[in-house]
Image (cartoon, rainbow, N blue to C red):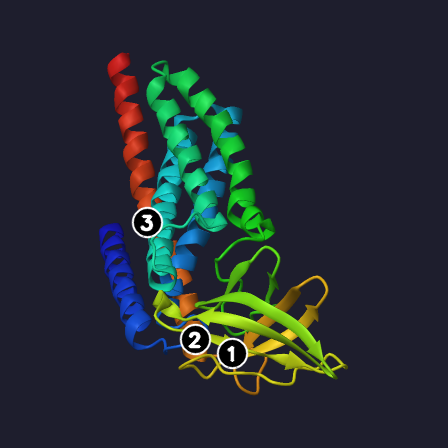
Amino acid sequence: MGERLAMTAKISLGLAMSGIIYAMFLVVPQYVGLGEAGRIIIVHVPTAWVTSAAFAVSAVFSILYLRSRSGLHDASAVAAAEVGTLFCLFATVTGAIFAQVVWGTFWNWDPRETSILVLLLIYAAYFALRSSVDDVPRKRRLAAVYNIFACVTMPFLMFVAPRIADSTLHPNCAFLQGSKCEGISLDLNGAKIGQLGDVVVELKAVQKQGDMTSATVEVRMPGLTDTADLIPTFDNAGQPADRPEFPGQSFRMILIEADVPAGTARVNIQAPGTGLLSNQRTLWVFMASNLTFGFLALWLYRIRATILHVTSLVQTTEAL
């Protein structure tokens, strides 16, 4: 009975993964806020979330090991850390693919790219520590303490650091139903560039003429194959006036605020007639992808934890 359930679970997981891949290319529509490159969020974002969950679970098992000195807890901590590292690699690779499509390079040291690389190095050091200590009890203790501190850095590197770095090119919002995009601030003085969806934007000028304040923003379309200058405006009441369309897209750019003396402006992207782009197909595929990758991580974790625990028991028996 147990074997039948396990086989059913594996087949179901395989079918679910196949369905997600199919839906990513053939169900999710074009230009859901990130253009064709936006399809990769169906894989990229869930793998990043699974990474966070796996590293957190690993730290919990490390805490349990320090309390119980149980080999099972140590094996579980290692297995969860390995799964987290694997999914962290997935997130890094898919992010690099997105960068190639949008910015024309796989790696540009964007703060999110840099922070996830640092996270990978931190957990690489965790595995290096375990392999460098021969005494098993000491190795487990040191690794558990290190793992707890490594997990403490994870929220900062994945969620805090990228958001406090003003120079990031990483998309500042994804157009999923219920998302809230506040736009992006641009600066003339520092020639600051940023990104809305899959479009790279750079402020070229900001000025006030009569009742209208305008900003000249250069936009670079996906793959850097097309550029254009858009000039959104707002009136004295702060209400957007001119909302130019992005080349080849139905989305428009709006000017939210501007400071002419300081040479700064904040712009946003919106679908015609709406403040947010809602798409049920994208939403459901995205949610299904999160569940599927979560179950995949759980399946990999259980297999790896069992192998590590059995190996530990065999080594202990042989030592006796």
Task: Give how far apart the Cα atoms at labels 2 and 3 are.
Answer: 31 Å
Pick whichever, 184 or 236, lies toward us: 236
Q: Position of residue 56 (x, y in %)?
A: 49, 42
Residue position marked by numbered label 3 in the rendering: 299
Residue position marked by numbered label 1 in the rendering: 277
Question: Does any portion of residue 181 appear in the rendered image?
Answer: no
Q: Position of residue 315 (x, y in %)?
A: 27, 20
Question: Does any portion of residue 35 appear in the rendered image?
Answer: yes
Q: Marks 1 and 2: CB-CB under 8 Å?
A: yes
Q: Position of residue 73 (x, y in %)?
A: 43, 31
Pick whichever, 308 or 139, lies toward us: 139
Residue 36 placement: quadrant: bottom left
Residue position marked by numbered label 2 in the rendering: 32
Mark 2 crowdedness (10 Å alpha carbons): few <14, some 14-19, many ≥20: many
Q: Secondary structure at mark 2?
A: loop
Left or right of 217 on screen, residue 90: left
Q: Which tag is nearer the camera, tag 2 or tag 3? A: 2
Task: Give how far apart the Cα atoms at labels 1 and 2 are.
Answer: 7 Å
Left or right of 270 on screen, residue 207: right
Q: Position of residue 284 (x, y in %)?
A: 42, 73
Which residue type carries mark 3?
Answer: Trp
Mark closer to the chain start, 2 or 3: 2
Left or right of 151 on screen, residue 84: left
Give the tally of numbered discs.
3
Which residue type carries mark 2?
Answer: Val
Q: Secondary structure at mark 3?
A: helix
